[in-house]
C-alpha cells in the first residue's frame, strides 16, 4: 500500500490504543476561616484630652489601640474569639508619703483577639484604707459603684481598647502597700484576667534583700558565689547606714568577700552608708569553697539580713543549693558509616556534661583490633587519649581520631573500651560501637552507538562500544579486575581500547566467559569510592557477520578479590543489531515543566543508523497530546495537520515527509511544533507525548513494506505560576518561655516564572492566639493594610524576582508551645491559593523530629536496601538520645548501627537547637512485593519521644531487561 494509506492505517491503530497520563489532582484546602462574609469595620473613637480628665473623673471610652487601620477583619467564633490577656492597670503615684494621698487609676481593657468581646465584665474591689472619691463620670455604658466595688459591663471591640479611669483617697494614717486588682472576664476567654497596680505609702525607705548563687549546679571542692541584692521599695534613702550580714553555710569555707566586706570565717559582714532611690538595688558578693561532700548534699543558707537604724532588720527567705558531681554522657559515631575497605575511618566521640563543673578531664579510647591508627589525639600502646582542662555544666566537646581499614570486607570492628575521667574522680564509659566493613559496590553500564547498523564497514557504519564502571563505595577497590568482552565487534587488539581518564594499562587478551564473545581483554587497577572509569575504543569499530537480525554485544564484568572475601561479579551488557535494512531512530525533547497557559515547543530529531532508505520517502507522525492546543502556524518544514477519530475520540496528528536518509545521515534540522497548555490544569498534571513514530519503506523481498520505530514518552509537568516557590522564614525558631520574646517573620513572595505578575495578594493570618502583632509590617514594594490579627499585601511581582514583607510579633509571656504563622498568596492565574508558613517553638524542652528515606526505590529482590534516618531537634538541647528501628519483615540485617534482637540501635550524647544527625543501616530484601519500615523512633533524657512515618519500598522481581530496539512491520 502507498504512503498515505499506510499513514491512515497507522493513525487508526494508534488512536484506538492512545492513553494519557495525569497525576492525581490535589486540592489545597483553605484555612478554616474564610474571609468571605466576615469583613466589617467596627466604629472606633478617641477621646481627646483623656490624660487630663483621668486625674479627677471616671471615664470610659473606646479607643483604637493604635492609629486606625484601613479595614477591620474579625473572625467569627468559634475560630475567632476575644483576647484580653494584655489588659493593664496603672496607678499614679506608685510611691507616696503618709498623711493622705489621691491615687489615680487607669485600666486599659485591650482586645488583641479576633472578635469583639460582647458584654465583657470589669470588677474592681477598692482596697482597704481607701475611699472612692465619687467622681464617676462615664460614657455609655455607665459604671456601677456599690459600696467598695466598681463594676463595668460592656463591649470591647475588635482590635480596640476600653479605658477606665477613677481615683481613690488613701487614709491619712495608712502606711504600707496599697494593692488594687481589677478582674476582667468574658465567656470566650480561657480564664479571667487580673490587672494589678500598687502604691507604696510610707515615710521611710523600705529595704528588701534577696539571694542568688552561681553556678546553677555547684560541685564538691568547687567555688560557689553568693550574690545578695538589697533593694529600696520605699522613700529615697539618703546617706543611710546599713549593715548586711550572711552566715557562712555549713560544709563551705569562705574564699573571698567582695565590696569591702569582712569575715571571721563564720559570718560575712558589710557596713556601708548608701543612697537609694525607689527601685534602686545594691549587690553584695562573696564566694566559698564547697567541702568534699557527696553528690546530692543540700547546702542551706537562711541567715542573711540587712539592718539600719531607720528601717530595722529585714531577713531574706531561706536559700538552698544542691551539690552534684559531674554527670557525663559519652557517645561515639563513625564516618563513613558504614566504613569501607582500603580507606580511613574516623571515630567521633561526643562528650556532654549535664552535672557540675568537671576539671582536668582525660578521654581515652583503645584502638580496636583490625584497624591501624593514623592520626588524632595522642596514641600510646594502642590507646588514643586527649586531655581537656574543664567542661562546665551543659557544655559539650568532641574528640576525633582516624584509623585505616585494610583490604577486608564483612568484618566487624568492635570499639568497646573508651572512657572519660575527671579530677573529681568521676568516670564514665561509652557504649559499645560495632561497625561492619563494607567492600566496594560496583555499578556497570554498557552502551553501543548506534544500536543498529548495516553489516561490515564503510562510511557511517561503525559502532562505538562504551563501558562505564563506577564504585559506589563505601570501600575502595585495589586491583579490581574488569573483563571487557566483545561479540562480533572488531576490537582486534588491546591497543584499540582506551580509558577515560587515561591510563597506561595495555589491555592484555583474556579468556572469554562464553563462545558468544570473539575478543576479550582484561583491566586491573584501583578505583576509589565515588570514582568512575570509562572503557571505549580509540576509533569506532566495524562489525563481524552480516545476517539480518544478528546481534553484536559489548560486556563488562567486574569483581574485586579482598583478603577476606570476593565481591560478586557485576555484569553490564549492551546489545546491538545487524540489519540489511534502514533503521531510523528518533529523539524528542520538550521542557520538563511548564505553566498553565504557556507555550512550549516539541523538537524531534531523526537519524539513520543502518542502510539507506528506499523510495517512497520516510515520514514522521506525531499525535498532539491531551491538555494542549496546537499552534498550527508553528509547525516547521511544511508539516501538515489533520484530525482523525478513533475509539478514544478525536485527535490531531502532525505529519512530515522526510528526505531520503543514507547510512549515518541525520536530518539537517529537527522538526518542531508548538502548543499552548490549557488554562484549567491542576498543578502536577503531566502532559505526555508518547505517540510519535518514524516510518520508512523497505523494498527487500523478504521484508517488503512499511517499517516503524516509535519514540519513548516525553513528559512535561504542569506547574503553578512561579508563586508556588514563595516561602516564609522566622527568627528565632526556638526560644525559652518568658517575657520579651520577639519573633521576626520574613515573607518572600517569589515569582520564579518568566512572566510578570500583577495584582498578587497576600493574606497573612497572624498568630494572634499566642502573640501580639507589633504594627511594624514593611514591604519592598506594594501596599500593606493590617489589623491586630491579619496583614494584607497587594502588589506586582516581576518575572524572576521577589517581593519581601517583614513584620514582628511579641509572644505572650506565659505561652509555651508551637507558633505557626500562615500566609495565603493569591493571583488570578492560580487555580488554588499558595500557602506558606513558618514555625517557631517556645519551649524549654527539645522538640524532636525523625524521618527516614530508603534507596534504591524500587529495589530488586535479593538486593541490598539502604535506610537513612535523620533526627532533627527544633527545640532546646536534647541529651542522651537513643534511636531505634525495628528490622523490617522479610529483610536480613547487613550493617549499620547496633543490632539488638530484632531492632537496630544508635546513641548520641547531645543534639543542639536546630541540629540534625543522620544514622544509616542496610538490609537484604527477601522475596516480597514491598518492604514496610514503620517502627522507628527517638527518645532523649529530657523525656521527649518522636516516631517516624512508615516508609514503603517497592520490590522488583528478576533482573534488568534490555530493550534496545523496537521495530514493527507495517
Image (cartoon, rainbow, N blue to C red):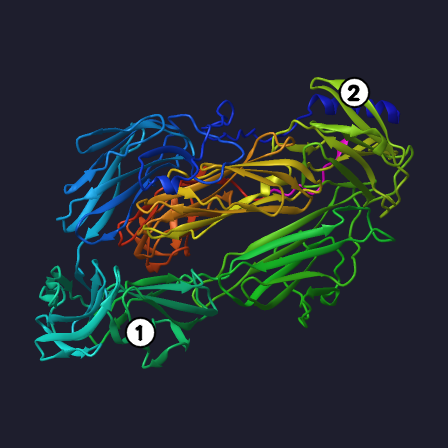
The residue carrying mark 1 is: 366
Q: Looking at the rendered structure, which numbered label has been put on residue 782?
A: none
Query: Most prominent secondary structure in the magenta stretch?
Result: loop
Q: Position of residue 269 (x, y in %)?
A: 13, 75
Q: In this view, does 693 lie to the left or right of 775?
A: right
The quadrant of the picture occupied by the N terminus is top right
| Residue 379 in sight from this viewpoint | yes
Q: In this view, does 656 lie to the left or right of 766?
A: right
Tell me, yes or no, whether the highlighted magenta stretch contains residue 69. no
Q: Is residue 648 above or below residue 791?
A: above
Q: What SS does tag 2 mark?
A: strand
Q: Which of marks 2 and 1 is nearer the N terminus?
A: 1
Q: Where is residue 687 in the image (x, y as percent from the top left)?
A: 67, 32
The residue located at (15%, 48%) in the rendering is 172
Q: In this view, does 913 lie above or below 856?
A: below
Q: Quadrant of residue 510?
A: bottom right
Bin the neighbour count of mark 1 within 10 Å (Cα to Cα): few under 14, some 14-19, many 20 and up.
some
Q: How far apart are marks 2 and 1 (CA)?
A: 79 Å
Q: In this view, does 443 lie above or below 750?
A: below
* 337 vs 860, nearest the viewer: 337
Q: Looking at the rendered structure, which numbered label has been put on residue 644?
A: 2
Q: Quadrant of residue 262?
A: bottom left
The quadrant of the picture occupied by the C terminus is top right
Q: What SS does tag 1 mark?
A: strand
Amino acid at each position: 500500500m502507498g504512503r498515505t494509506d499506510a499513514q491512515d492505517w497507522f493513525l487508526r491503530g494508534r488512536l484506538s490504543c492512545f492513553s494519557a497520563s495525569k497525576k492525581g489532582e490535589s486540592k489545597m484546602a483553605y484555612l478554616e476561616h474564610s474571609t468571605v462574609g466576615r469583613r466589617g469595620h467596627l466604629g472606633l473613637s478617641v477621646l481627646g484630652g483623656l490624660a487630663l480628665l483621668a486625674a479627677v473623673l471616671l471615664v470610659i471610652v473606646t479607643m483604637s489601640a493604635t492609629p486606625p487601620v484601613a479595614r477591620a477583619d474579625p473572625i467569627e467564633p468559634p475560630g475567632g474569639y476575644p483576647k484580653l490577656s494584655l489588659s493593664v492597670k496603672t496607678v499614679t503615684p506608685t510611691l507616696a508619703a503618709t498623711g493622705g494621698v489621691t491615687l489615680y487609676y487607669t485600666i486599659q481593657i485591650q482586645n488583641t483577639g479576633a472578635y469583639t468581646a460582647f458584654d465583657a465584665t470589669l470588677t474592681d474591689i477598692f482596697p482597704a484604707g481607701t475611699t472612692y472619691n465619687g467622681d464617676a463620670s462615664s460614657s455609655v455604658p455607665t459604671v456601677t459603684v456599690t459600696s467598695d466595688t466598681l463594676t463595668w459591663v460592656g463591649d470591647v471591640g475588635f482590635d480596640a481598647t476600653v479605658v477606665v479611669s477613677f481615683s481613690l483617697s488613701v487614709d491619712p494614717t495608712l502606711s504600707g502597700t496599697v494593692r488594687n486588682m481589677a478582674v476582667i472576664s468574658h465567656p470566650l476567654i480561657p480564664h479571667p484576667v487580673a490587672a494589678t497596680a500598687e502604691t507604696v505609702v510610707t515615710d521611710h525607705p523600705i529595704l528588701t534583700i534577696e539571694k542568688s548563687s552561681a553556678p546553677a549546679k555547684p560541685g564538691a571542692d568547687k567555688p560557689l558565689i553568693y550574690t545578695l541584692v538589697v533593694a529600696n521599695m520605699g522613700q529615697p534613702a539618703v546617706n543611710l547606714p546599713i549593715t548586711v550580714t550572711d552566715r557562712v553555710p555549713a560544709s563551705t569555707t569562705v574564699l573571698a568577700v567582695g565590696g569591702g566586706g569582712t569575715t571571721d570565717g563564720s559570718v560575712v559582714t558589710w557596713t556601708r552608708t548608701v543612697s537609694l532611690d525607689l527601685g534602686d538595688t545594691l549587690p553584695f558578693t562573696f564566694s566559698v569553697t564547697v567541702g568534699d561532700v557527696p553528690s546530692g548534699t543540700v547546702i542551706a543558707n537562711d541567715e542573711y539580713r540587712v539592718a539600719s537604724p531607720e528601717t530595722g532588720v529585714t531577713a531574706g527567705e531561706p536559700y538552698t543549693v544542691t551539690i552534684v558531681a559531674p554527670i557525663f554522657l559519652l557517645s561515639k559515631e563513625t564516618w563513613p558509616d558504614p566504613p569501607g575497605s582500603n580507606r580511613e575511618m574516623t571515630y567521633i566521640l561526643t562528650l556532654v556534661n549535664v552535672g557540675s563543673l568537671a576539671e582536668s578531664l582525660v578521654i581515652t579510647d583503645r584502638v580496636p583490633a583490625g584497624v591501624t591508627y593514623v592520626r588524632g589525639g595522642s596514641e600510646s600502646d594502642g590507646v588514643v587519649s586527649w586531655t581537656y582542662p574543664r567542661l562546665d555544666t551543659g557544655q559539650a566537646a568532641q574528640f576525633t581520631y582516624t584509623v585505616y581499614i585494610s583490604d577486608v570486607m564483612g568484618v566487624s570492628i568492635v570499639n568497646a573500651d573508651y572512657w572519660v575521667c575527671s579530677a573529681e574522680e568521676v568516670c564514665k564509659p561509652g557504649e559499645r560501637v560495632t561497625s561492619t566493613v563494607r567492600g566496594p559496590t560496583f555499578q556497570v553500564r554498557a552502551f553501543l552507538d548506534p544500536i543498529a547498523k548495516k553489516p561490515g564497514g564503510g562510511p557511517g557504519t561503525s559502532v562505538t562500544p562504551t563501558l562505564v564502571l563506577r564504585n559506589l563505595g563505601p570501600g575502595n577497590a585495589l586491583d579490581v579486575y574488569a573483563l571487557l568482552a566483545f561479540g562480533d565487534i572488531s576490537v582486534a587488539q588491546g591497543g584499540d581500547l582506551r580509558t577515560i581518564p587515561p591510563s597506561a594499562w595495555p589491555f592484555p587478551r583474556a579468556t572469554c566467559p562464553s563462545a558468544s564473545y570473539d575478543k576479550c581483554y582484561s583491566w586491573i587497577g584501583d578505583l576509589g569510592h565515588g570514582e568512575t572509569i570509562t572503557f571505549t575504543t580509540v576509533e569506532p569499530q566495524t562489525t563481524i557477520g552480516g545476517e539480518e537480525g544478528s546481534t553484536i554485544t559489548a560486556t563488562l564484568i567486574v569483581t574485586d578479590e579482598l583478603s577476606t572475601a570476593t565481591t560478586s561479579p557485576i555484569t553490564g551488557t549492551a546489545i546491538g543489531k545487524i540489519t540489511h535494512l534502514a533503521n531510523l531512530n528518533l529523539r524528542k525533547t520538550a521542557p520538563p515543566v511548564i505553566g498553565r497557559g504557556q507555550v512550549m515547543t516539541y523538537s524531534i530529531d531523526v537519524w539513520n543508523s543502518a542502510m539507506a532508505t528506499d523510495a517512497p520517502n520516510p515520514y514522521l507522525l506525531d499525535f498532539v497530546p491531551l491538555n494542549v492546543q496546537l499552534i498550527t502556524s508553528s509547525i516547521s518544514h511544511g508539516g501538515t495537520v489533520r484530525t482523525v477519530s478513533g475509539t478514544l475520540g478525536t485527535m490531531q496528528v502532525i505529519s512530515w515527509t522526510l528526505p531520503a536518509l543514507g547510512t549515518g545521515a541525520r536530518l539537517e534540522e529537527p522538526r518542531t511544533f508548538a502548543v499552548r497548555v490549557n488554562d484549567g490544569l491542576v498543578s502536577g498534571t503531566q502532559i505526555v507525548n508518547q505517540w510519535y513514530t518514524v516510518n520508512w519503506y523497505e523494498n527487500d523481498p523478504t521484508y517488503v513494506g512499511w517499517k516503524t520505530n516509535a519514540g519513548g514518552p516525553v513528559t512535561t509537568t504542569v506547574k503553578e505560576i512561579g508563586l508556588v516557590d514563595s516561602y516564609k522564614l522566622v527568627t528565632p525558631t526556638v526560644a525559652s518561655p518568658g517575657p520579651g520574646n520577639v519573633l521576626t517573620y520574613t515573607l518572600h513572595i517569589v515569582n520564579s516564572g518568566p512572566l510578570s505578575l500583577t495584582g498578587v495578594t497576600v493574606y497573612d493570618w497572624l498568630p494572634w492566639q499566642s502573640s501580639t502583632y507589633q504594627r511594624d509590617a514593611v514591604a519592598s514594594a506594594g501596599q500593606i493594610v493590617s489589623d491586630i490579627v491579619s496583614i494584607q499585601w497587594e502588589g506586582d511581582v516581576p518575572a524572576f524576582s521577589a517581593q519581601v514583607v517583614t513584620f514582628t510579633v511579641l509572644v505572650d509571656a506565659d505561652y509555651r508551645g508551637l507558633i505557626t504563622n500562615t500566609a495565603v498568596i493569591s493571583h488570578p492565574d492560580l487555580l488554588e491559593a499558595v500557602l506558606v508558613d513558618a514555625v517557631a517553638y517556645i519551649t524549654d524542652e527539645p522538640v524532636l523530629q525523625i524521618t527516614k528515606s530508603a534507596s534504591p526505590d524500587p529495589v530488586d529482590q535479593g538486593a541490598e536496601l539502604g535506610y537513612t534516618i535523620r533526627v532533627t531537634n527544633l527545640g532546646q538541647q536534647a541529651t542522651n538520645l537513643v534511636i531505634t528501628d525495628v528490622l523490617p519483615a522479610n529483610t536480613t540485617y547487613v550493617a549499620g548501627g547496633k543490632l539488638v534482637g530484632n531492632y537496630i540501635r544508635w546513641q548520641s550524647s547531645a543534639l543542639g537547637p536546630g541540629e540534625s544527625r543522620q544514622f544509616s543501616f542496610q538490609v537484604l530484601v527477601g522475596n516480597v512485593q514491598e518492604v514496610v519500615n514503620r517502627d522507628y523512633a527517638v527518645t532523649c533524657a529530657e523525656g521527649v519521644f518522636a516516631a517516624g512515618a512508615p516508609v514503603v519500598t517497592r520490590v522488583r522481581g528478576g533482573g534488568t531487561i534490555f530493550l534496545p530496539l523496537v521495530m514493527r512491520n507495517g
